[in-house]
Amino acid sequence: MIRKIEFHKDYFIDFYSKQNKKVQEKIEYVFKLIRQVERIPKKFFEHLTSTSGLYEIRIEYQSNIYRIFCFFDEGKLVVLLNGFQKKTRKTPKKEIELAERLKKEYFDEKEKRNGKL
């Protein structure tokens, strides 16, 4: 199983660049799993209920928890959206709403590029 990972604009890159080297290494480790493992363990990757196809990539390093929102496009393409450090048990609604907007923006721009709008 080989999945491709892409970024929608610089949202993920902005988040990633602010993390320390050890957190970045852990993120890269989880990305390697996502690219290569057919059934990604829930510990690292899970569908967000009550969303239209949003998933969260789960990163834990020391006592810190990080989340990166993403979705699938064309089957094996994982598109990364925003990321954040999770500080409460529940995923903040504003982060989910932002990810939903970014996903819509991605598909609107894709349609525009393909001449469908």
Image: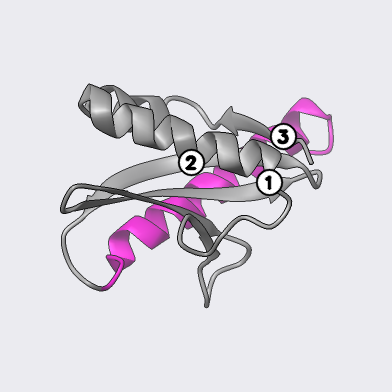
Q: How is the image coloured?
A: one colour
Residue 37 tag number:
1
User: Label 2: how many residues lie within 10 Å, few (<14), some (14-19) or many (20+)?
Assistant: some
Q: Which residue is mark 3?
A: 110
**Mark 1 or mark 2, which is nearer the start of the sequence?**
2
Residue in the picture at 51% in, 68% down:
48
Cα distance between the residues tagged 1 and 3: 27 Å
Which residue shows up at 49% across the image and 26% down it? Answer: 9
Q: Magenta stretch containing residue 98, yes or no?
A: yes
Q: Which circle marks residue 30 in the picture?
A: 2
Other-residue count near label 3 (Cα within 10 Å), few / some / many at <14 / 14–19 / ≥20: few
Nearer the N terminus, badge 3 or badge 2? 2
Q: Is residue 71 left or right of residue 59?
A: right
From the top left corner, tell me how far across and down residue 110 is, in percent. Answer: 72, 34
Left or right side of 72 for 24? left
- Which amino acid, mark 1? Val
Kindly check if marks 2 and 1 are in contact, taking CB atoms under 8 A apart as contact: no
Residue 49, placed above or below residue 103: below
Q: Which residues are magenta?
A: 90-117
Mark-to-mark CA distance, 2 and 1? 10 Å
On the image, the x and y values in percent for residue 18 come to 22, 26
Which image quarter: residue 39?
A: bottom right
Secondary structure at badge 1 equals loop
Q: Is residue 20 above or below residue 70?
A: above
Q: Is residue 107 left or right of residue 64?
A: right
